[in-house]
Image: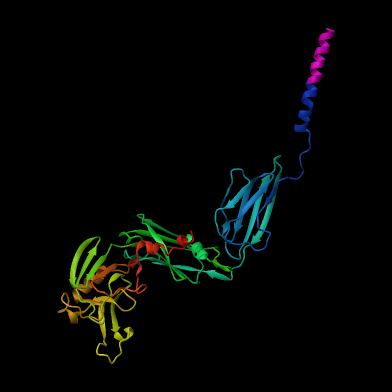
Amino acid sequence: MYARAVGVCAVAVLATTACGPISASLNTSPLPSESKARITVPGAQLGPVRPDRPIVVTVADGRLTDVFVTGPDGPLPGSLSKDAHRWVSAIDSLDFGASYSVNAQAVDRWGTPTRSTTDFTTLIATKRLHASITPTDGDVVGVGMPITVHLDRPVSSPENRAAVESRLAVVTSPSVEGAWNWVGDRDVLYRPRSYWPGNTEITVRADLKGLRVGKSVWGQRNTQTRFRTGAAMVSVVDMKTHQLTVKRDGKVLRVIPVTTGKDGFVTRSGTKVVISKERARIMDAATGGTDKTDPEYYRLKVEYALRVTWTGEFLHAAPWSVSKQGRENVSHGCTGMSTANAAWFYSLSRPGDVVVYRGSNRTLEPGNGITVWDRSWSEWTDGSALRTTS
């Protein structure tokens, strides 16, 4: 009995000795009175914050449990990393000269909580970049109309142009291949590889808000427009046969006798696009440089005028030359037809419709109207800033 008692006692002592230190390390060491987790908002303490970056909240020696950020437009959404060490706002750019407040909570590895409030402001931009887009919201245009993003400040360097272009987006239904091309330092144009399909829905975004363009110029806001194309009107003027073949969605609707420019006023060959429609207008040869004493000077009212160049080429009614239409070129560069045919063609046409001119040795000058289709696809894509800086 004595031996067994000693044995039991020994077992009990050994059990106490083995378990005691482990139990004490888990249950009897003091918990930290202050959380070891440290919450930071990088950059917020360095003065006005750049608006072209999202808000980031991080924690060291712990994990984030809650982040609430408010700005001038209310709460900002964001996402937490899987390890709960980092929170990033869902927007990539902030407002200018605005105040933001970051309220965050975290716990350390012992579960001790901490919270942090960080207030900061964004810098005030003294030079701001605005963009306008054409076609405008709700427009219906012809299949030859390019998209134009016009900037109210020049953007010259390839790097800054690439930065702007990377913020431009075109979404179409159906899907269409297209590309941007810079024309000067304020305009960037977009066209498809070939004409837009008829009845295409197009959305254009210029997300320039908070984009730094140059040393002290910042994009002011995001801009968006939605428009669509109408039926595909792609007509052809043959200046040798003196005929206008009108096509809609690939089908010939009518072949119209016309007259185009005579010697000294030869109509340009090339792919032209209807710029504007005017039910009636006064045409004055002086605007094209003809002196009023010149026998070729004229001033007259024309009807159903469709402009296709900036230098004064139109398609319009020319009842005075009906006997020559379909036979001879007698105009001062415009495309004349009977009043009935002009009224019919005018009723079907809209800005952006395509009229291809063939048969003269005089070519359409770049920029004399909407001339984006007189460049090959490779030439067009070479004008992309993203392509030249890649």
**The residue positioned farthest toward the top in the image shown:** 1
Residue ID at (37%, 73%): 367
Residue 374 position within the rendered picture, expressed as x and y whole percent measured from the top left: 33, 67
Indicate left or right for 207 with 69 as reference: left
What scheme was used to colour the molecule? rainbow
**Which residue sits furthest front?**
361
Say left or right for 374 vs 55. Answer: left
Q: Nearer the viewer, residue 286 or 84?
A: 286
Q: How many marks?
A: 0
Q: Is residue 240 magenta?
A: no
How far across and how far down the image is residue 220, in percent?
A: 53, 66
Q: Is residue 33 above or below residue 206?
A: above
Observer-nearest of 362 and 229? 362
Res. 240 visible in picture: yes
Magenta stretch: dominant SS?
A: helix
Quadrant in which the N terminus is drawn:
top right
Residue 27's spot in the image, x, y percent?
76, 32
The spot of residue 58 in percent (x, y) is 65, 50
The answer to which of 108 and 383 lies nearer the viewer is 383
Residue 167 seen in render: no
Name above or below for residue 40 compared with residue 179. Answer: above
13 is within the stretch colored magenta: yes
Q: What residue occupies the far bottom of the structure in this picture?
A: 293
Judged left or right of residue 262, residue 99 is right
When asked about the image quadrant of residue 268, the answer is bottom left
- Residue shown at the point (23%, 64%) measured from the top left: 247
The correct choice, above or below, for 30 with respect to 106 in the image is above
Which region is colored magenta? 1-14
Relative placement, left or right, of 361 versus 188 is: left
